[in-house]
Image (spheres, grey):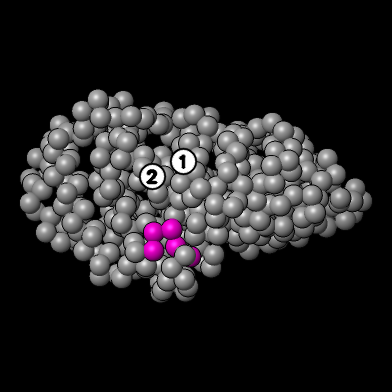
Amino acid sequence: MNYSDYFNPEVETMSEDRLKALQLERLQKTVHHCMNSPFYQKKFQELGITPEDIKTLDDVQKLPFTSKEDLRENYPFGLACVPMKDCVRLHSSSGTTGNPTVVLHTQKDLDEWANAVARCLWMVGSRPEDVFQNSAGYGMFTAGLGFQYGAEKVGMLTVPAAAGNTIRQIKFIKDFGTTVLHAIPSYASRIYEVMKEEGIDPRKDTKLRVLCIGAEPHSEEQRQRIEQNLGVKAYNSYGISEMMGPGVAFECQEQNGLHIWEDYFIVEIIDPVTLKPVPDGQLGELVLTTINREAMPLLRYRTRDLTRILPGECPCGRHHRRLARLQGRSDDMMILKGVNIFPIQIEKILLGFKELNTDYLITLETVDSNDIMTIDVELNQMFTDDYNRLKSLEREITRQLKDEILITPRVRLIPKGSLVVSDEKKAVRVKDLRKLF
Ligand code: ADP
Ligand code: ZN
């Protein structure tokens, strides 16, 4: 790799030891800074600790956890560690799982955030010559402004298209020669579908080269489908508003896990029940401590996202460790007949069938005191309406699903366009009707 392959060569290729030293220095500074907030003063008192107790990186485990509940209980500004006059921006999470939470930023926080996103975009090969189009919602959703500022920092011509109005979106891609696109995966699939309807061949009629996809769980199969359909390389982008938004972890061109920027975060993977660290490489809940934030540092924030740390070095030369593809949130996990199932496991099987479209809905309900799972999945337009072929396809999908999730779902193949998908919101993959009774 050359120096020019990195946006921040010094930090990105910093040795593990130097990175750890930097982390400790920033962690110590952060815990002292946290004492500006009554919220953290109280938490530290309850645990009988002071900032001086943080002498090594492992001491992070002495610190209190924080969670979405803390943010909700102290809504809106209860976790601020600087005077409000120093804050210049407020964002909130999408509210996918309940009331939104508020995150405050100083100007320095925004600069650092833009720097992290720029690093990610550079890492996947974006350069000032590129045209970057952001098809994520602007406003409170962090993926809008988050990518905007990062892309500008790279020096690209940016098109703040925002989400929705897909025909116009495609017109921009063509007219402005967009080469790098950011969209959530369900919307990237939608853009392709509309291109097909409009008779546009993305490989011939557009200059699209790189796609950044994230903000919602998606399988490797989904990524490959997007790559094949649009003729691009698609990179997984992990963001969470409480940490800042996009730019937290991103795949490099090796596409083998997401580098998490360890000069911004201390990473822990814990068992969500015992709250103890899981052995290296095991699946658990991602817990992050911000070590580069002024307005609202978060200590040991429980993301509820499940992942694991991938072992080994990445050939790209970055020593920041890699997270495995995010499985989904702990609250996305469905428990059916005692079996734990993630929607992404189902998606993986469905997208192995080229006859199927990328939209699906899993419904859980109780019938005669039995929990049953129904999967409605859209067919591709191209596919046959030959009844026998459809039935045998249904049987084969059901068989493969049973192998993966250990229970037998009811699979319904439905015409393309039957499911309602939002252009602007994260896709809803599960409807649990059991909770109604
Ligand atoms: P909300 O929690 O209300 O959806 P955010 O917009 O902050 O608010 O979304 C962050 C969440 O989105 C993460 O905690 C995670 O569950 C999900 N997410 C973000 N990026 C990815 C990704 N690349 N893969 C899987 N899930 C993701
Ligand atoms: Zn890498």
Q: How many marks?
A: 2
| Residue position for label 2 | 113
Q: Is residue 250 magenta?
A: no
Going by the numbered disc 2, the residue's amino acid type is: Trp
| Residue position for label 1 | 149
Asked if the residues shown at circle 2 and circle 1 are in contact, with their CB atoms under 8 angstroms apart, the answer is yes
The answer to whether the residue bearing label 2 lies less than 8 angstroms from the nearest atom of ligand 1 is no
Task: Using residue 394 as the reference point, say whether residue 278 is left or right of it.
Answer: left
For the residue carrying disc 1, how many other residues have a C-alpha within 10 Å: few (<14), some (14-19), or many (20+)? some
Residue at 46% x, 50% y is 118
Residue 92 visible in the shown view = yes
Q: Position of residue 343 (x, y in %)?
A: 57, 49
Above or below — where is 39 with respect to 346?
above
Q: Is residue 6 magenta?
A: yes
Q: Front-most of 332 and 95? A: 95
Q: CA distance from mark 2 to mark 1?
A: 8 Å
Q: Position of residue 208 (x, y in %)?
A: 68, 52
Residue at 31% x, 56% y is 263
Residue most toward the right? 386
Task: Using residue 264 as the reference point, say whether residue 337 is left or right of it.
Answer: right
Q: Position of residue 69 (x, y in %)?
A: 32, 34
Task: Using residue 35 as the reference point, say whether residue 179 is left or right of it.
Answer: right
Q: Front-most of 409 and 89? A: 89
Q: Position of residue 22 (x, y in %)?
A: 23, 60
Residues drawn in magenta? 5-9
Residue at 50% x, 40% y is 148
Q: Give the dominant element type of the magenta stretch: helix, strand or loop.
A: loop
